[in-house]
Image (cartoon, helix red, strand yellow):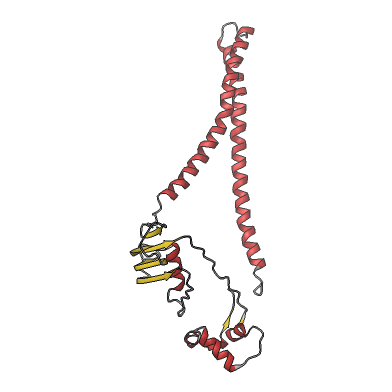
Amino acid sequence: KLYAWEEAFKNRICAIRKKELSAIFKYDLLRFFITFAWTAAVGWMIFFTFLTHVLVDESHHLTAPTVFVTMGYFIYIRKSSNCLASVIDFIISGVNSAERVAKFLVLKEIHKELVVQQTKEDKVSQNSVISISDGSFAWSAANPPVLKNISLDIPKGSLVAVVGMVGCGKSSLLSAVLGEMIAQNGSIQKKGTVAFVPQEAWIQNDSLRNNILFGSSFKEDEYMEVLQACALTSDLSILPSGDETEIGEK
């Protein structure tokens, strides 16, 4: 809201919606003409059939038996022709749906054979709820592994904190435990179910220092203690203006 993007995004949405409405209008117009053509075709067929009969026949006139028999045949034809337009519509929709399903089915599977769900009967690692043995994990098969040859053992009932500098692989480790990364080597053993509750950070459009203080008065000793506890000193050394660097939501 600070950057006032409302009008810009409104214009983009309206432009996309305008294209969508134009496509819907063309589709409905084409469907109308197809339906009208199939409905009117039988009437024109009856007219030209009787006209041809009158012109070709030597007597040049229609008899009641001829008219009623011919109309009976055309009634059956009309019932079939009325369904034909809907059948064509259903075929086109079915082909489009089949193409979407086919694209989904040919996607590469994420092989989770290396993620083993333990049961109560398993005797391996009875005291561990999550165990990783020499695991290497990547986001895709074409990319090199982000986590290489890691081993982890989390005992039952323990509280574990994974700390480290930005980009060291903390979030990737959680994704690997959840089975969202490709395991290229090693194995993961999990016992029970896993609940993942990610954080949803909110950042002010202000300096990094003011974001940390969040309205509190600046006390250098306490401030430095917080930086040390959060392992932010190494990150601040990378920023061009240190803790005075302007940050915010983009």
Q: Nearer the viewer, residue 111 or 153?
A: 153
Horizontal relation, residue 146 to residue 78: left or right: left
Nearer-the-camera pick, 26 or 7: 7
Q: Residue at x 43, y 73 (%)?
A: 169
50 shown above or below 220: above
Vertical relation: 148 (above or below) 124: below
| Residue name at image x 57 percent, y 33 percent | 86
Q: Nearer the viewer, residue 144 or 135?
A: 135
For the point 45% across and 66% down, the residue is 175
Q: Position of residue 95 (x, y in %)?
A: 48, 41
Between 228 and 44, the residue placed more toward the observer is 228
Q: Is residue 141 above or below residue 206?
A: above
Q: Is residue 243 visible?
A: yes
The quarter holding residue 38 reads: top right
Residue 250 coordinates in the image, percent (x, y): 58, 73
Q: Looking at the picture, how far across and down is residue 145, in whole percent?
A: 36, 68
**Image quadrant occupied by the N terminus:** bottom right
